[in-house]
Image (tube, grey):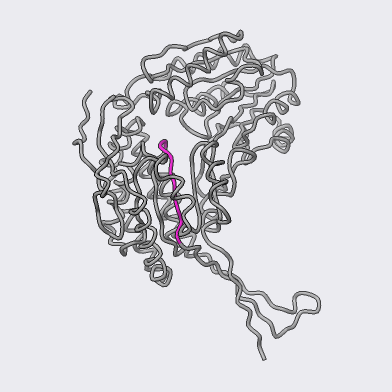
Amino acid sequence: MKSTLSLSTYKFYINGEWRESSSKQTVDILSPYLNEPIGKVQAMTKEEVDQAIHLAHQAQKNWADTELNKRAQYLYQWADELVNKQDEIAETIMQEVGKNLKDARKEVIRTADFIRYTVEETLHMHGESMKGDSFPGGAKSKLAVVERVPLGVVLAISPFNYPVNLAVAKLVPALITGNTVIFKPATQGAISGIKIIEALEQAGVPKGILNIVTGRGSDIGDYLVEHEGINMIAFTGGTKTGTHIAKKAGMIPLVLELGGKDPGIVCEDADLELAAKQIISGAFSYSGQRCTAIKRVLVHENVADELTALLKEEIEKLSVGSPEQGCTIVPLIDQSSGDFVQGLIEDAVQKGSIVITGNKREKNLIYPTLLDHVTENMKVAWEEPFGPVLPIIRVKSDAEALQIANKSEFGLQASVFTKDINRAFSISNKIETGSVQINGRTERGPDHFPFLGAKQSGMGAQGIRKSLESMTREKVTVLNLS
């Protein structure tokens, strides 16, 4: 299947202008399933990064002074433009990161909804006032006015797997609160990022409020993160990269959404058919290339055989192949990702795990694989695969499930399957994660819910209200009344 996108060389966007890099260098963007380039993006220089940040600072003061309802109008228009361009953007997402067209289009529509909700939430954030005499000994003549003000220039770094939604989830809270943005999309995802900026330009926004920087993170990533002109960083990606950013960034606010090893804990009283369906949906949608994918099953040994049979049955219903055919299991983002997942499977098999189904590979397409009798000495019990492999770990008790769950360096989400609500809350209270799903798959959203990780899964909080707070700071003005 050949690409239907023209092999364009895309320009970067700063100060309201599309430009070519003075480096004369570009980066090929390879489709994970077409196995050919679908476009090229600019490899920007450090001098061009400097210029983008300088222009963002120049634009920020006027943007922050722009009336909130005017900023809102621009962003409402952006949401409308994304809907108008949904087919073009969805096609780009599919070809660039291998997501099927139905899910790609849903991502664009979800993003437009995210923009509108974020604007509405901001319009209803009114600050507060505090009287001095409400504290013992405080003076009645003092009145504090507490408001939220922008941080300045926000660096937004988005991942490949949701190149539109997880980009805009950073861009919109920053913009609506009066910040300007330097947007660095994942290299694999950069064309999708450019497409959403084209839609923003159609909304007629002022120059300089959003500048897109393209190029390999290995070339300009540290320079961006350490730049004295960056006032806040919002990043979604791997834990290794996130830890590196935290060490490099210095004393600026950070929100880091990192990796996970989300467990699905199945108690012996669980509705096993429900659990099986939710686990398979959570583990294998978009080939498991989700930070919130269920990445291991901790099941009570008394129901493990029955659950395993149900999981096998559900897995064998999954469609495997090209995203153009609407398949759920599609090629992983690149060959090295396929190598890593295959390595985890082979390590488990060598150490005694049983392959229930799967363990078949065609280039970077890994067939959905279910591994039973996984033990703690196997890499797949601990490492995040970001691919379609699901290990089953049999446990004797809830306590053992919790012990294994909490032993992980990660703490993003967990699912608990049980018919006993007291048991559910007892387990939830003891799991070291940012979120726990009861009788449902691990997932991000709804987008207004808080979203956060513990341990090596991140720092700071997202979710619409939380993102707005993360990208502003409180400022207190005290009135001394006569």
Q: Residue furthest right?
A: 136
Q: Is residue 69 above or below residue 348?
A: below
Q: Is residue 157 magenta?
A: yes
Residue pictured at 54% horizontal, 48% vertical: 248
Counting the numbered discs, the total is: 0
- Does the magenta-highlighted stretch encompass residue 5? no
The magenta-colored residue range is 153-161
Q: Residue furthest bottom?
A: 482
The picture places residue 478, in percent across and down from the top left corner, at 63, 79
Pinpoint residue 417: horizontal percent, then vertical percent: 64, 28
Classify 431 as above or below 389.
below
Which residue occupies 34% across, 51% down? 212
State the image coordinates of residue 264 (x, y, percent, origin top left): 61, 27
Q: Quadrant of the C terminus?
A: bottom right
**108 on left or right of 302:** left
Front one among 9 and 83:
9
Task: Please give left or right for residue 433 compared with residue 335 in the image.
Answer: right
Q: Is residue 167 above or below residue 400?
A: below
* Nearer to the camera, 135 or 438: 135
Q: Image check: 346 left or right of 61?
A: right
Residue 317: quadrant of the picture: top left
Find residue 404 and report its horizontal and vertical position in percent: 69, 25
Could you say which is closer to the camera, residue 306 or residue 264?
Answer: 264
Q: Is residue 432 left or right of residue 195?
A: right
Location of the N terminus by quadrant is top left
Q: Is residue 178 above or below residue 377?
A: below
